[in-house]
Image: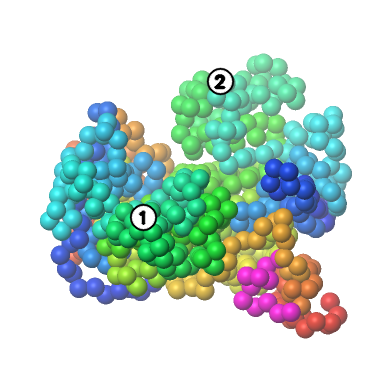
């Protein structure tokens, strides 16, 4: 059974343009379907505004979808702040990008890591102390660092504290939102290795959100590429990165610095405004392969003929002619 | 182990006299040494990459060279622009050089631009300062520059404010302003770090294009080895305030000699092939106030021997043109 299932989930925000402007709807996430299996990692990759962080918040039940359903371990996600949701939060935790912002500067490392145990009423004081000591060890911190405060730690150490706190309640699911993006490459490698080890030991399912394709490939068992609120390609990371099917995924892979691109085809234009979505395929104004059908009709994410790669693109599906049966 | 591809020698230049020569540059803040004697040169038209992690001194080097550090910084050594000493030069001398012969752009274009002035005016201001044009002439030149850096519909965008532009477009505006003085050297300090990867590719492409059009030299300061591999002819790797390796980009990425460089490349996830555990460098960068006695990297180094703690390893040639500051480096 899947640990986490998002089924055609959409999330719409109301946005006011200007001070007295009228409210307009911003489709942050549109008809996204994803699954996370126990002990496996789903990587979600895309650029600013593609909806990847909103997807993470929907997965944790922090936001309620306007359409579609979220299921955790076979059960519908309870409404946020309900008693059932609070109980469930012990089984699903968030690892955010900025550890300093996520930690309380006035609490020692040990108190922060113990906090979820207190909240969920796990163990007595003695057991909690033992658990904290064990967690510190698991994330590679020294026992004497338990008494430190966040400002006295390096960026990598702070991210280890955040991780220890997230692991305290023994969660089944971690939603990691750009957890290594603020770290230097040598420290980033330490944290990526740590996440891989912890997952192997504890069979944690992970939703790993990042803009960094190298990190996504390293850590994911399955990858979803998002563009302007939609998943446009999904599949095995090795296959998707070696031979991306969607023109946007192709551009993304070609743009990775130090890749095989050499002198590459550079994608023109800026990412569009989510409040001003192009018609049809949202990528068509920047797409070198776009045909008239792309302007008219939103492509559905479905298996491509041949290898069955999931891709939402009329051209990649070989259905670029208008009027062809989908 | 190397996951970076360097496009085969983009330019084959004949060695000429350096444009800028930095000798034994040291910087200390309140008695704490941040830069321990940097020797560096850049030739006309060359592109030089400076890579290293946070706090290694890659930005401080150029801020010090151009007199942009606060007065509390204690700067010593020599920075020469074709024979003219820049370190501790007078204001008028520096004003002619900065934004003129040497221009600099930074990571966050939005905070470098003035939010209350239209972008056309800001670029025209740079033109007025460095080219002596004024009024309509300055505006016309600003328009030409915005066009040159690929602002779509530049004439209409002259009247836009920075908040009306995307991050990538603001970086283009900054580059336009930097080009106003027709610089011989552009120093780009993490110019694409705040941008999305497809926009980063556009800006890097633009910088390459401008370099081939104008013949200006480029110093690219970056933490991203991939960016430097794509963009630079020659690379210096910095660690804890020193240059630890210097080589042609192809030599550095194909045959890294210093264990720190090897570590950085090993820590970078590959884009193809079997997935292997990342070779993380253990530990962290030393605190500038308590540096190790010998080689600053020794406490994290898998090749460390006792002799590494005895003294500073000199930056020596391993093969012609490939220097490494390591007594345990791979040689020849």
Task: Give the residue drawn at x 73%, y 43%.
Answer: A20
Q: How many marks?
A: 2
Which contiguous range is marked in magenta? Answer: A282-292
Label 2 marks which chain's residue? A
In this view of the protein, which residue sits in the foreground, B92 or B255? Answer: B92
Q: Is residue B291 visible?
A: no
10 Å crowding of disc 1: few (<14), some (14-19), many (20+): many
| Quadrant location of the C terminus of chain A in the rendered image | bottom right
Q: Quadrant of residue A273?
A: bottom right
Please determine whether, in this image, residue A222 is positioned above or below residue A128: below
Q: Which corner quadrant of the image does residue A272 belong to?
A: bottom right
Colouring of the image: rainbow
In depth, the one of A15 and B187 nearer the eye is A15
The residue under label 1 is B126
> Is A189 positioned to the left or the right of A323 in the image?
left
Picture coordinates of residue B120 (x, y %)? 46, 57
Mark 1 secondary-structure assignment? helix
| Mark carried by residue B40 | none
Residue A245 lies, with reference to residue A78, above or below; the image says: below
Q: Which residue is mark 2?
A: A106
Residue A288 colored in magenta in the image? yes
Front residue of A140/A160: it is A160
Tell me the mark number nearer the camera, choosing from 1 and 2: 1
């Amino acid at each position: 059974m899947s640990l986490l299932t998002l089924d055609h989930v959409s999330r719409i925000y109301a946005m006011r343009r200007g001070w007295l402007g009228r409210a307009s709807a911003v489709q942050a996430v549109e008809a996204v379907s994803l699954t996370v299996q126990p002990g496996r990692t789903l990587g979600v990759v895309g650029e600013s505004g593609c909806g990847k962080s909103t997807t993470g918040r929907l997965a944790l039940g922090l936001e309620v979808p306007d359409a579609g359903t979220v299921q955790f371990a076979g059960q519908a996600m309870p409404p946020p702040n309900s008693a059932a949701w609070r109980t469930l939060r012990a089984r699903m935790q968030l690892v955010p990008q900025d550890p300093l912002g996520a930690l309380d500067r006035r609490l020692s490392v040990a108190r922060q890591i113990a906090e979820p145990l207190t909240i969920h009423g796990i163990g007595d004081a003695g057991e909690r102390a033992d658990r904290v000591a064990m967690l510190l060890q698991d994330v590679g911190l020294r026992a004497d660092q338990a008494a430190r405060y966040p400002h006295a730690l390096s960026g990598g150490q702070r991210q280890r504290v955040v991780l220890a706190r997230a692991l305290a309640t023994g969660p089944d699911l971690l939603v990691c939102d750009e957890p290594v993006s603020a770290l230097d490459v040598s420290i980033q490698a330490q944290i990526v290795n740590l996440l891989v080890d912890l997952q192997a030991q504890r069979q944690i399912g992970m939703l790993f959100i990042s803009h960094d394709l190298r990190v996504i490939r390293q850590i994911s068992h399955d990858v979803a590429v998002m563009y302007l609120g939609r998943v446009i390609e999904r599949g095995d990371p090795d296959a998707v990165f070696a031979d991306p099917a969607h023109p946007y995924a192709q551009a993304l892979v070609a743009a990775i610095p130090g890749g095989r691109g050499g002198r590459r085809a550079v994608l023109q234009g800026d990412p569009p405004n989510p409040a001003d979505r192009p018609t049809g395929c949202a990528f068509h104004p920047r797409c070198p392969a776009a045909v008239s059908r792309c302007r008219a009709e939103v492509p559905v994410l479905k298996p491509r003929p041949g290898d069955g790669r999931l891709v939402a693109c009329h051209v990649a599906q070989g259905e670029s002619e208008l009027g062809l049966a989908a | 182990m190397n996951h970076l591809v360097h496009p085969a020698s983009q330019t084959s230049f004949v060695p000429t006299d350096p444009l800028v020569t930095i000798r034994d540059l040291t910087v200390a803040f309140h008695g704490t040494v941040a830069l321990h004697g940097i020797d560096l040169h850049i030739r006309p038209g060359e592109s030089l990459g400076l890579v290293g992690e946070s706090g290694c001194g890659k930005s401080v080097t150029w801020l010090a060279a151009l007199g942009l550090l606060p007065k509390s910084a204690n700067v010593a050594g020599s920075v020469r622009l074709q024979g003219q000493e820049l370190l501790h030069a007078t204001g008028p001398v520096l004003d002619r050089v900065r934004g003129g012969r040497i221009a600099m752009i930074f990571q966050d274009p939005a905070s470098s631009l003035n939010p209350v002035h239209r972008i056309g005016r800001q670029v025209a201001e740079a033109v007025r300062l460095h080219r002596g044009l004024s009024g309509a002439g300055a505006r016309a030149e600003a328009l030409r520059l915005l066009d040159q850096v690929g602002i779509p519909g530049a004439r209409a965008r002259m009247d836009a404010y920075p908040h009306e532009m995307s991050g990538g477009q603001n970086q283009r505006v900054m580059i336009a302003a930097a080009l106003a003085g027709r610089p011989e050297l552009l120093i780009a300090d993490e110019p694409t770090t705040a941008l999305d990867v497809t926009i980063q590719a556009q800006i890097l492409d633009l910088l390459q294009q401008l370099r081939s059009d104008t013949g200006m030299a480029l110093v690219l300061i970056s933490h991203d080895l991939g960016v430097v591999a794509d963009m630079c002819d020659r690379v210096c790797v910095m660690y804890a305030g020193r240059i630890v390796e210097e080589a042609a980009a192809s030599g550095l990425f194909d045959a890294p000699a210093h264990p720190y460089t090897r570590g950085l490349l090993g820590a970078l996830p590959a884009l193809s092939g079997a997935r292997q555990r990342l070779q993380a460098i253990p530990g962290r960068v030393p605190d500038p106030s308590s540096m190790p006695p010998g080689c600053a990297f020794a406490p994290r180094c898998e090749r460390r021997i006792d002799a590494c703690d005895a003294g500073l390893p000199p930056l020596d040639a391993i093969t012609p043109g490939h220097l490494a500051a390591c007594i345990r480096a791979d040689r020849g």
